Image (cartoon, rainbow, N blue to C red):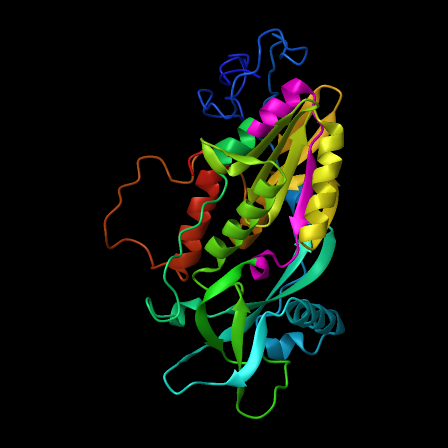
């Protein structure tokens, strides 16, 4: 391998490279003269057309709305099935026991969250219903302690894709179903029974697993995953704890995890297959095959390498901002406009506006 990503070259006549932070050193050096040493060919990116109409975007936008409440979702057979599958998965893993609530304990609420998952082309992949605990009602020192958990940095994701492109490694994607409930819950937490579950009278859920929404769930899941892949010979990169590396005589396998989504690549083909089998034995996994969509990045493979696009992600944001039929402009502000604190009307949803700003900044690599 190479010490840094400074070997990657992009023609100065084109747009800035997608892969950022060229000084990021992810892996230890290999011996010089490796047959997998990257070539010195320059890689350039064609500029993206600025003439994109709403007709190009609208067909890719998901027009099916997610139900806002259990009452509405319970009327649709597709969402009924999704909720039943979620409850069955939670019961299968022993997520809770039905018990009487101790006198000195309080209850955490829960709610159903619905989302239609889509493929990179915008078509429906599945209807997903997730039971989420209302972690905002938890009290520090009573039903949770530590909460911090690491996730992969976007620079690491892009650097990994760059390395795979230069090395001509295949990229694979896997997903952990109900990842958080694999985490062991050390704190004593009691939850109200969810809608759709009919427990005996006066019984509540004593949580045994790290349910989504609990403050400590991300930390518990990552600790479980870290210890599990360590058994299979993987070590965390010192530069990003969410990147795991295994080196052997057959080559190298790299595994990057972001919450419950994984990218797997490397030159050890048999090692990749063994890793997939190992993970499938330890967790309920979904093998998604070749990488096509990850954190808003559409990945298309070709003989020349990998093409990255954020068209679907951008169109989803434009739809969320209700700007589908708007015209393109070089700047969102009128020239020479003078602003005062009292001009204009308050935004109807400031939270949504802030979320959109963060997402658009992330697309520009400013996250």
Q: Is residue 174 positioned above or below 92 on the image?
A: above
Residue drawn at x 60%, y 20% as measured from the top left = 45
- Residue 290 in view, yes or no: no
Write down the quadrant of residue 128 in the picture.
Answer: bottom right
> Relative to 149, is 227 on the left or the right?
right
Residue drawn at x 59%, y 47% as measured from the top left = 228
Query: Is 213 inside the magenta-drawn segment?
Result: no
> Relative to 358, is 282 on the left or the right?
right
> Relative to 170, is 319 on the left or the right?
left
Tell me where the magenta segment starts and ends, as one range. 160-182
Residue 352, position as x, y percentages in the image: 44, 56
Residue farthest to the left?
Answer: 341
Q: Is residue 253 positioned above or below 32 on the image?
A: below
Q: Nearer the viewer, residue 259 or 332?
A: 259
Residue drawn at x 42%, y 40% as measured from the top left = 332
Q: How many marks?
A: 0
Residue 249, position as x, y percentages in the image: 68, 22
Residue 7, position as x, y percentages in the image: 53, 12
Residue drawn at x 52%, y 63% as measured from the top left = 210
Quadrant containing the N terminus is top right
- Residue 47 in view, yes or no: yes
Q: Nearer the viewer, residue 75 or 146?
A: 146
> Relative to 15, is 251 on the left or the right?
right
Quadrant containing the C terminus is top left
Residue 218, position as x, y percentages in the image: 49, 55
Q: Is residue 94 positioned above or below 167 on the image?
A: below
């Amino acid at each position: 391998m190479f010490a840094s990503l400074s070997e990657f070259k992009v023609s100065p006549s084109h747009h800035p490279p997608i892969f950022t932070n060229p000084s990021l050193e992810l892996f230890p050096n290999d011996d010089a003269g490796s047959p997998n040493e990257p070539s010195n060919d320059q890689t350039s990116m064609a500029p993206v057309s600025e003439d994109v109409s709403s007709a190009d975007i609208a067909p890719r936008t998901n027009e099916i709305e997610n139900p806002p409440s259990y009452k509405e979702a319970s009327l649709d057979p597709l969402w009924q099935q999704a909720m039943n599958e979620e409850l069955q998965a939670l019961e299968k893993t022993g997520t809770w026991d039905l018990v009487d609530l101790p006198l000195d304990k309080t209850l955490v609420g829960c709610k159903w969250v619905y989302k239609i998952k889509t493929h990179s082309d915008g078509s429906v992949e599945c209807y997903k219903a997730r039971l989420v605990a209302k972690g905002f009602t938890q009290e520090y020192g009573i039903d949770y302690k530590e909460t911090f958990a690491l996730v992969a940095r976007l620079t690491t994701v892009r650097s990994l894709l760059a390395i795979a492109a230069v090395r001509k490694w295949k990229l694979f994607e896997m997903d952990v179903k109900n990842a958080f409930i694999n985490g062991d819950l050390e704190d004593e937490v009691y939850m109200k029974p969810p809608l759709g579950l009919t427990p005996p009278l006066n019984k509540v859920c004593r949580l045994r697993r790290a349910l989504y929404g609990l403050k400590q769930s991300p930390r518990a899941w990552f600790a479980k995953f870290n210890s599990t892949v360590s058994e299979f010979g993987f070590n965390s990169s010192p530069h990003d704890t969410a990147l795991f590396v295994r080196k052997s005589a057959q080559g190298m396998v790299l595994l990057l995890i972001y919450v419950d989504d994984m990218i797997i690549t490397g030159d050890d083909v048999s090692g990749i297959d063994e890793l997939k089998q190992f993970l499938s034995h330890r967790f309920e996994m979904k093998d998604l095959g070749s990488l096509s969509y990850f954190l808003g990045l559409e990945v298309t493979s070709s003989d020349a390498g990998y093409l990255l696009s954020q068209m679907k992600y951008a169109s989803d944001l434009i739809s969320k901002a209700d700007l589908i039929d708007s015209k393109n402009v070089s700047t969102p502000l009128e020239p020479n406009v003078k602003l005062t604190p009292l001009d204009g009307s308050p935004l109807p949803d400031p939270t949504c506006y802030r979320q959109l700003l963060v997402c658009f900044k992330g697309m520009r690599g400013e996250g």
